[in-house]
Image (spheres, rainbow, N blue to C red):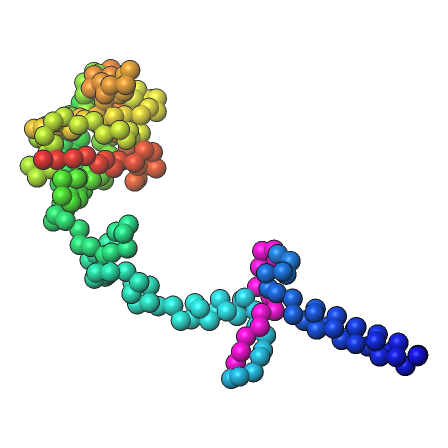
Amino acid sequence: MKLLRIGVLAAALALAATAHAQVKISDLPAGTALAGTEAVPAVQSATTVKTTPAAINTYVQSQTTAGTITGKFTGTCDSTTFLRGDGSCATPTGSATSGTFTTTFTGFTVPQTNIGFSWWKNGNMVMLQMTGAPNGTSNANTVVSSAGALPAAIRPATTVQPSVTVGAQDGGSVKAACVQLLTDGTIQFGIPNAGNCSPSGWTASGAKIVYNGTSSGVGTGIWMYPVP
């Protein structure tokens, strides 16, 4: 009888061990965020081995090249195209052009000369950047203006007032200056007044500076606007 009991107990333990070994993956407890050191089973040369998420990540990165990424998209994907939201590579429409120019700004006791600008145009959009900085003494409260400065290719069809302002010094006080671009190519800087760009809003005397954001760190000196 004693031997029978021992046999039954041994059989029960064997069944329990077998049942434990056959737990479904779906029945396992949920894991937490991976640390990269967890043991993960794998098969190498018909041998079951263990590895880690960190090792798998290293392997995946070693196999990833620009070709394997762009190969997932349709069309020609290279430095001359862009990726669309539908997963295809396309060539930008329109021809991109660019240029530079210098101009003279009035509104100072001594006109400010050789103020530099750079511009880029793609399709009907222009990005204009002021690389110089008009810096002088105010001549009354007159507008800081450069008549006909914009090249014909980047003149707007109507007067535009880009929303981006630029830092300025007006009579010793630091303020935000606004810019207006006129259809005849004139560039004007004024002081915002009740939401409008007031060309005559400058103080009648004292220092008068329009910062470009590059050399001064004040403002941006970069504007985007449409053209015909």
Task: Considering the whole magenta stretch, tell me its main secondary structure.
Answer: loop
Hey, which residue is sitting farthest front in the picture?
A: 1
- At a point 57% along the width and 64% down the height, the residue shown is 36
Q: Nearer the viewer, residue 213 or 56?
A: 56
* Residue 3 x %, y %: 90, 81
- The location of residue 181, given as percent across then percent down, is 15, 29
Q: Give the x, y percent position of residue 144.
A: 19, 24
Quadrant housing residue 205: top left
Instruction: For residue 149, say whether it is visible.
Output: no
Left or right: 185 as drawn, with respect to 54: left
Q: Residue at x 28, y 50 (%)?
A: 85
Q: Quadrant of the C terminus?
A: top left
Quarter of the rendering containing residue 60: bottom left
Q: Nearer the viewer, residue 14 or 114?
A: 14
Which residue: 9% across, 30% down? 157
Q: Is residue 123 above or below residue 58?
A: above
Query: Is residue 177 positioned above or below 97 on the image?
Result: above
Res. 194 visible in picture: yes
Q: Nearer the viewer, residue 116 or 44?
A: 44
Q: What range is drawn magenta here?
A: 31-44
* Rendering quarter of residue 184: top left
In this view, 63 is above or below 102 = below
Q: Residue at x 11, y 49 (%)?
A: 95
